Image (cartoon, rainbow, N blue to C red):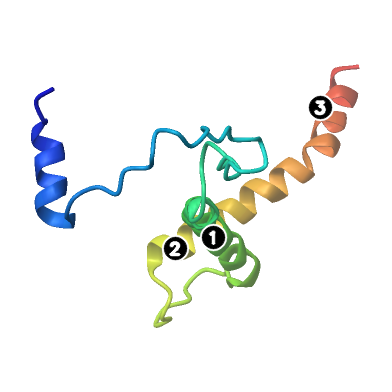
C-alpha cells in the first residue's frame, strides 16, 4: 500500500515508526483509562466579562443616585466642579422621586375634593 503524505512527513521528521509486533494481544481500554471529559460551554473569564457588563450597566445609575442624594439642588449654586447636566439630572430625579412618594396624599386630596 502506498504511503500517504502525512506518513512520509512523520517519518521524515520523527524517524521510522516503532511498530508493535502483531502477535501481541490488543489492549482494550477501560473507562478508567480515558481522561475525564471537559465540561462544555463557557469556561474561564466569562465571570469577568459578566462583571464588566454589569458594572457598565449599573455604574452610571449608581453615580446618578449618589449625585441625587448628595447634590444641593437649591437654585443659584454655581462654581461647582459638578457639570450642570449632572446637577440638573440629579435634581430632576430627586424631584420626581419626591412627587412619586407624595402621590398618595395628592390623590386623596383630589378624591376628597370630588366628593
Q: Position of residue 91 (x, y in %)?
A: 55, 59
Task: Of the two numbered discs 1 and 3 on the same chain, state the one appearing first in sequence.
Answer: 1
Q: How crowded is mark 3: few (under 14 residues within 10 Å), some or many (20 or more)?
A: few
- Check if mark 1's residue and mark 3's residue have beta carbons within 8 Å: no
Question: Label 2 vs label 3: CA separation?
Answer: 34 Å
Q: Residues within 10 Å of mark 1 (few under 14, many from 20)?
A: some
Quadrant in the rendering for residue 2 = top left
Nearest-to-viewer mark from 1 and 2:
1
Q: Tell me what residue is drawn at x 60 percent, y 60 percent.
A: 65
Q: As rendered, which of 78 and 3 lies closer to the eye?
A: 3
Q: As rendered, which of 113 and 48 lies closer to the eye?
A: 48
Q: Which residue in the protein does label 2 denote?
A: 86
Nearest-to-viewer mark from 2 and 3:
2
Quadrant in the rendering for residue 108 = top right
Q: As rendered, which of 27 and 57 lies closer to the eye?
A: 27
Determine which of the numbered discs, if any, sits on residue 110 in the image. 3
Element class at badge 1: helix
Element class at badge 3: helix
Element class at badge 2: helix
Quadrant in the picture for the C terminus: top right
Residue 47 sits above or below residue 84 on the image: above
Amino acid at each position: 500500500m502506498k504511503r500517504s503524505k502525512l506518513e512520509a512527513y512523520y517519518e521524515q521528521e520523527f524517524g521510522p515508526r516503532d511498530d508493535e509486533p502483531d502477535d501481541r494481544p490488543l489492549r482494550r481500554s477501560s473507562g478508567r483509562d480515558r481522561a475525564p471529559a471537559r465540561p462544555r460551554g463557557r469556561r474561564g473569564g466569562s465571570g469577568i466579562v459578566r462583571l464588566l457588563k454589569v458594572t457598565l450597566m449599573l455604574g452610571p445609575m449608581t453615580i446618578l443616585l449618589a449625585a441625587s442624594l448628595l447634590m444641593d439642588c437649591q437654585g443659584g449654586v454655581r462654581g461647582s466642579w459638578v457639570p450642570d447636566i449632572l446637577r440638573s439630572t440629579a435634581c430632576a430625579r430627586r424631584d420626581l422621586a419626591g412627587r412619586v412618594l407624595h402621590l398618595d396624599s395628592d390623590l386623596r386630596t383630589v378624591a376628597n375634593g370630588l366628593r
